Amino acid sequence: MIAEFRRHPGPAAVFFAVAAFLVVFLGVPVVNVVFVAFQDPATGAFTLVNFEDFFRTSLFRESFWNSIYVAAMTVVVASALALPLAYFTTRFHFGGAAVIQSLGVVPLIMPPFVGAVAMQLLFGRNGSINLLLDSWFGITIPFMSGLNGVIFVEAIHYFPFILLNVTASLQIIDRSMEESAQNLGSSGFRLFRRIVFPLAMPGYVAGASLVFLKVFDDLGTPLLLNVNKLLAPQAYLRISTVGVTDPMGYVISVILVAFSLLAMWAATLALRGKDYATVQRGGGGLARRRMRPSEKVGAYAVVLLVLVLVLSPHVGLALLSFGTVWSFSTTPDAYTLAHYHKIFEDTPEFVTNTVLYATLAAGIDVVLGTAIAYLVLRTRLPGRVWLDYMAMGAIVVPGLVLGIGYLRTFHGVEAPWGGQPLAAWWGILVIALAVRRLPYALRSCTAALQQLSVSLEEAAENLGAGKLRTVRRIVVPLMAGGMLAGFVTSFATAAVELSTTIMLVARESDAPLSYAIYVYMQSAAGRGPGAALGIVAVVIVALGAFFSHRVIESERRERAVLAAA
Amino acid sequence: MHPAPGRSAAVGVAVENVSLSFGAMQVLTDVNLAIEPGEFFALLGPSGCGKTTLLRLLAGFERANSGRVLIGGKDVSALPPWRRNVGMVFQSYALWPHMTVRRNVAFGLEERKIPRQQLADRVQRALDLVGLGALGERRPSQLSGGQQQRVALARTIVIEPDVLLLDEPLSNLDAKLRVQMRHELLTLQRTLSITTIFVTHDQEEANTTADRIAVVDRGVIQQVGTPIELYDRPANLFVANFLGVANVIPGSVSESGGRMMFRSREGDLVVPLPNGHRDIRSVVFRPQDIALMAADAASPPDKIRLSGVVSHREFLGGVVRYHVDAGTRAFVVEEPHRRNHVAVPPGAPVSLVLDPAHAVGVRD
């Protein structure tokens, strides 16, 4: 065991550095949160009294059930949006397929809270749609009232997770599965219900559990829609009003983590022993059918409706950012550039902070991701897989929980360079963002390294290059595509992350975009500049995603031929 | 090609008492080899026999549990791969896709901090040597399989390694190219007179190129010898069966009247084995050493005659291969084919004539 570390001092040093980082910035804060939740505030002894208090308070009980209801209903609504699209694109000759597949980036480039207020103005009680419906038909639909609003907004943002996963599953089902069902007399919806959907189940469960988690943990959307009787907002409000010592925030955090674990566990349980990858090599591929004209009209209508819904937050946000006043009317009264002027003149630091933080966080992620991937795949150091597990573990820690953990852990630690607590330093926010997004970067670095044949490295060593030179000259250049993909995913999601940010921003001058959007959106006067910031965020993230896509594609084309060898 | 200036003489390789295991799995057991300077040496065996592991051990990618490896008389067991100056050509070629052919070939010289001008000359010479002088600016992905193979070779020989290791170098080529590359490889090896160790599972490849072959099975060296020695005098059943087709008759050796005699298990065959010893458990006859005669043909003296029936036959072009059932035994017999020669039809009764002089006694 120890000998392995001693024999490879270089990798061993990296191993311990990474382990120390993960323990200090992920392990300790989370353990701290759990610890406080089970601790008597007065005596410090182990107790369940905090949980008793929690469930005895009717507000918390209501929030608890609301959170479960909202998350579950979002999965239902998102499934209703995603399943027809997935089916149309994989089983029919259908022109809209490419457009639908590109919807997958929507939740990445714009998190739900950014568009929430715009959705209120479009779909709310006095929003554009209901004003039109009222004047035409004399009816209104309560899209956005109370919990409905959260469900509606979250479903529109997160359904692509289900869409992409189910599509991927549908694409690996051998056509003979469906053809034999048709041969035996099944067709249409029965065919879908009895054969296609069960075979696509692994993808559906993966997507649905992800959506459930995202919604269950989401803080920004309910806060901006002013729906506070949910778990995450309650935790935030307790910590920000009562203070970091109040145990209720910790109890809620433990419940959030527990549900994350539960959802993951349920997903793995549902998939255990079900190897549904049924494509046989050299088989017939996908069975695509032609639609009848009437079916075609129906399909296009569904796709159009979904597209309008998906783009509505963006359109609404754009209108809001260019509008002067928008209230009790279908569209703004007049248009102006004043909001953009205001944010670039008065508060350019929001944009620069965002780019700085997201770049640093994504940089840290790629370095850590590459290091962990290398240790796991290319060394035999004992305990190396635990690094991987631990880094991936960040995925079940909601941003709110990590934020609370950081406050608790680093509040009492004074920064060595000045009289402020470490928790108030902007660098801590960067590290928190890096920890949150590490799983994305790690997965794409691991995938990139896995595709690299070991013999490419051995050839370099054989020709006289040591380990470090081999990493520099062979491994890193060949992993560059994967590292870049990881960087961009981390960057994009870190740039618009709110729940950790909201806990850790100590002063406005250190705030990134997401925090500023949240603050601006609180007041009617701030909505314009807030929306303008939202648009800036979307542009930054979309540009990053676009360029990385270009780079990755061109590299892939260059190497495709040899990768197989 | 002239050997590069300052090129040292070829070195020998010695493997002494090497054992290696991956966890509970024993991969190599007490391996001993002495490879002569300048020799073209093949490691031959079925897949999973440990031959590639042995090659990787020489290159420094595996570490033996016990024993040592000497290159040119120096113990290199503790040296990492990058200090060994042992050139290896990988089965997959392992060309770096992000570098041009020239950069690939230059890599090892760059790591050795060779001055720029000399480096460029040597790279060009290596490329010329493998016939790719004009393709230096291509990417590996723009080359055919055979060209990629040559780049891999150039990349390795340009560093003037003490030993050249080839891991199934021809397995990714189509049949015709394989024969051509085999020949080129041998020519190159003779030109550079570099000690070369070559891993293959293809006996034809080993027979046609190697000076000597080590047959490996289940991590143990079964026999070392020239191709003809191995074929004519296999030491054990595995070698007999692995190299060509063998008709095996199990039995035992005993001494009678001062002579070593092999007696088949059924007791019906007795073969004198002048150099036989008591470890021998079978005798082997090669298919071409058995004569096929008409059932009623007269038996030649001092030969063993068995009667049987042809069960089926295969026409292989130059030879016809008969499968003959003789009692409980099944024999494979090969006869050269000539035009207008009438082959014996299946179902025909035949006599098999075995010459005791062709019997080879083997251990299990």
Image (tube, rainbow, N blue to C red):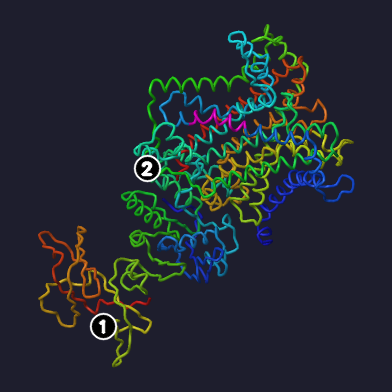
The quarter of the picture where residue B284 lies is bottom left
Query: Quadrant location of the N terminus of chain A?
Result: bottom right
Q: Is residue A52 above or below residue B345?
A: above
Of B124 and B272, the residue lying toward us: B272
Badge 2 sits on which subunit? A
Residue occupying the point 50% across, 22% down: A302
Q: Alpha-carbon distance for marks 2 and 1?
A: 55 Å
Q: Which residue is mark 1?
A: B271
**Can you give x and y, in whole percent of width and height, for residue A511 in the image?**
77, 27
Tell me the element at label 2: loop
**Can you give x and y, in whole percent of width and height, for residue B287 in the image?**
24, 69
Using residue B276 as the reference point, say whether residue A533 is left or right of it. right
Q: Residues within 10 Å of mark 2 (few under 14, many from 20)?
A: few
Residue occupying the point 14% across, 80% down: B300
In the image, the segment drawn in magenta is: A73-86
Of A373 and A515, the residue lying toward us: A515
